[in-house]
Amino acid sequence: MGKFNGFNAGGGNMQQLMKQAQRMQQEVARVQEEVGNAEFESSVGGGAVKVTITGAKEFKSINISPDAVDPDDIEMLQDLILSAVNEALRMAEEAMETEMNKVTGGMGGLGGFGF
Protein backbone atom coordinates (compact mmCIF):
# COMPACT_ATOMS: atom_id res chain seq x y z
CA MET A 1 0.00 0.00 0.00
CA GLY A 2 1.22 3.46 -0.84
CA LYS A 3 2.10 6.10 1.69
CA PHE A 4 1.33 9.78 1.51
CA ASN A 5 3.23 12.05 3.92
CA GLY A 6 3.48 9.29 6.49
CA PHE A 7 -0.17 8.22 6.28
CA ASN A 8 -1.08 4.78 5.04
CA ALA A 9 -3.07 5.69 1.95
CA GLY A 10 -4.93 2.40 1.82
CA GLY A 11 -5.62 1.71 5.47
CA GLY A 12 -8.02 2.66 8.18
CA ASN A 13 -5.90 5.63 9.25
CA MET A 14 -6.99 7.58 6.20
CA GLN A 15 -10.65 6.76 6.84
CA GLN A 16 -10.30 7.79 10.45
CA LEU A 17 -8.59 11.02 9.40
CA MET A 18 -11.41 11.75 6.95
CA LYS A 19 -14.03 11.14 9.67
CA GLN A 20 -12.20 13.50 12.01
CA ALA A 21 -12.03 16.13 9.26
CA GLN A 22 -15.78 15.77 8.63
CA ARG A 23 -16.52 16.17 12.35
CA MET A 24 -14.28 19.22 12.50
CA GLN A 25 -15.97 20.70 9.44
CA GLN A 26 -19.40 20.18 11.03
CA GLU A 27 -18.19 21.77 14.26
CA VAL A 28 -16.73 24.72 12.34
CA ALA A 29 -20.07 25.24 10.58
CA ARG A 30 -21.89 25.11 13.93
CA VAL A 31 -19.53 27.68 15.46
CA GLN A 32 -19.79 29.96 12.43
CA GLU A 33 -23.58 29.90 12.70
CA GLU A 34 -23.58 30.36 16.47
CA VAL A 35 -21.13 33.26 16.49
CA GLY A 36 -22.68 34.67 13.31
CA ASN A 37 -26.03 34.96 15.09
CA ALA A 38 -24.55 36.47 18.26
CA GLU A 39 -24.74 40.22 18.75
CA PHE A 40 -21.86 42.47 19.76
CA GLU A 41 -22.34 45.99 21.10
CA SER A 42 -19.68 48.65 21.26
CA SER A 43 -20.15 51.90 23.12
CA VAL A 44 -17.77 54.87 22.90
CA GLY A 45 -17.68 58.42 24.18
CA GLY A 46 -19.33 57.50 27.46
CA GLY A 47 -22.30 56.03 25.61
CA ALA A 48 -22.54 58.84 23.06
CA VAL A 49 -22.42 56.31 20.22
CA LYS A 50 -23.45 52.66 20.42
CA VAL A 51 -23.13 50.17 17.58
CA THR A 52 -24.61 46.67 17.53
CA ILE A 53 -23.56 44.09 14.93
CA THR A 54 -23.89 40.36 14.50
CA GLY A 55 -20.96 37.98 14.37
CA ALA A 56 -21.66 37.81 10.64
CA LYS A 57 -20.79 41.54 10.58
CA GLU A 58 -24.30 42.69 9.81
CA PHE A 59 -25.12 46.00 11.44
CA LYS A 60 -28.19 45.83 13.65
CA SER A 61 -28.21 49.37 15.01
CA ILE A 62 -26.32 52.61 15.48
CA ASN A 63 -27.55 54.79 18.33
CA ILE A 64 -26.32 58.36 18.70
CA SER A 65 -27.04 60.35 21.82
CA PRO A 66 -28.43 63.82 21.09
CA ASP A 67 -25.67 65.16 23.35
CA ALA A 68 -23.10 63.87 20.85
CA VAL A 69 -24.50 66.00 18.05
CA ASP A 70 -22.64 69.29 17.88
CA PRO A 71 -23.11 71.04 14.52
CA ASP A 72 -19.81 72.83 15.10
CA ASP A 73 -17.88 69.58 15.60
CA ILE A 74 -19.13 66.99 13.12
CA GLU A 75 -15.64 65.47 12.94
CA MET A 76 -15.83 64.36 16.57
CA LEU A 77 -19.13 62.57 15.92
CA GLN A 78 -17.68 60.92 12.82
CA ASP A 79 -14.67 59.75 14.84
CA LEU A 80 -16.93 58.36 17.57
CA ILE A 81 -18.98 56.43 15.00
CA LEU A 82 -15.85 55.02 13.37
CA SER A 83 -14.44 54.01 16.74
CA ALA A 84 -17.66 52.26 17.76
CA VAL A 85 -17.95 50.44 14.42
CA ASN A 86 -14.34 49.30 14.46
CA GLU A 87 -14.57 48.12 18.07
CA ALA A 88 -17.74 46.12 17.36
CA LEU A 89 -16.08 44.51 14.34
CA ARG A 90 -12.99 43.69 16.43
CA MET A 91 -15.20 42.10 19.09
CA ALA A 92 -16.96 39.91 16.51
CA GLU A 93 -13.65 38.87 14.90
CA GLU A 94 -12.14 38.04 18.28
CA ALA A 95 -15.15 35.93 19.27
CA MET A 96 -15.03 34.01 15.98
CA GLU A 97 -11.28 33.43 16.29
CA THR A 98 -11.58 32.26 19.90
CA GLU A 99 -14.37 29.81 19.10
CA MET A 100 -12.62 28.51 15.97
CA ASN A 101 -9.42 27.92 17.94
CA LYS A 102 -11.43 25.76 20.34
CA VAL A 103 -12.60 23.64 17.41
CA THR A 104 -9.37 23.49 15.42
CA GLY A 105 -6.91 23.45 18.30
CA GLY A 106 -5.34 26.65 16.99
CA MET A 107 -4.72 25.30 13.48
CA GLY A 108 -5.83 28.50 11.73
CA GLY A 109 -5.83 28.83 7.98
CA LEU A 110 -7.58 25.55 7.20
CA GLY A 111 -8.71 26.79 3.81
CA GLY A 112 -11.03 23.86 3.20
CA PHE A 113 -13.07 24.79 6.23
CA GLY A 114 -14.13 28.24 5.05
CA PHE A 115 -12.20 30.48 7.40
Image (cartoon, rainbow, N blue to C red):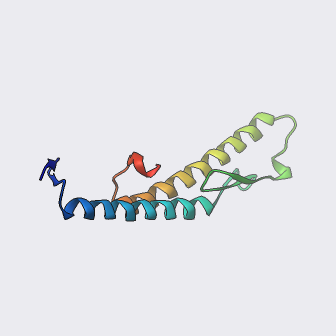
Which one is in front, 30 or 101? Answer: 30
On screen, residue 103 versus residue 52, left or right, reads left
Percent position of residue 24, x then y = 38, 62
Percent position of residue 100, x then y = 43, 58
> At 50% from the left edge and 54% from the top edge, which residue is drawn?
94
Percent position of residue 106, x then y = 34, 55
Percent position of residue 63, x then y = 79, 54
> At 37% from the left edge and 50% from the top edge, which residue is drawn?
108
On screen, residue 57 versus residue 15, left or right, reads right
> At 67% from the left edge and 48% from the top edge, which residue is drawn?
84
On screen, residue 81 versus residue 14, left or right, reads right
> At 60% from the left edge and 56% from the top edge, which residue is drawn?
55
On screen, residue 52 versus residue 9, left or right, reads right
- What is the count of numbered marks? 0
Q: Which residue lies furthest to the left in this view?
A: 1
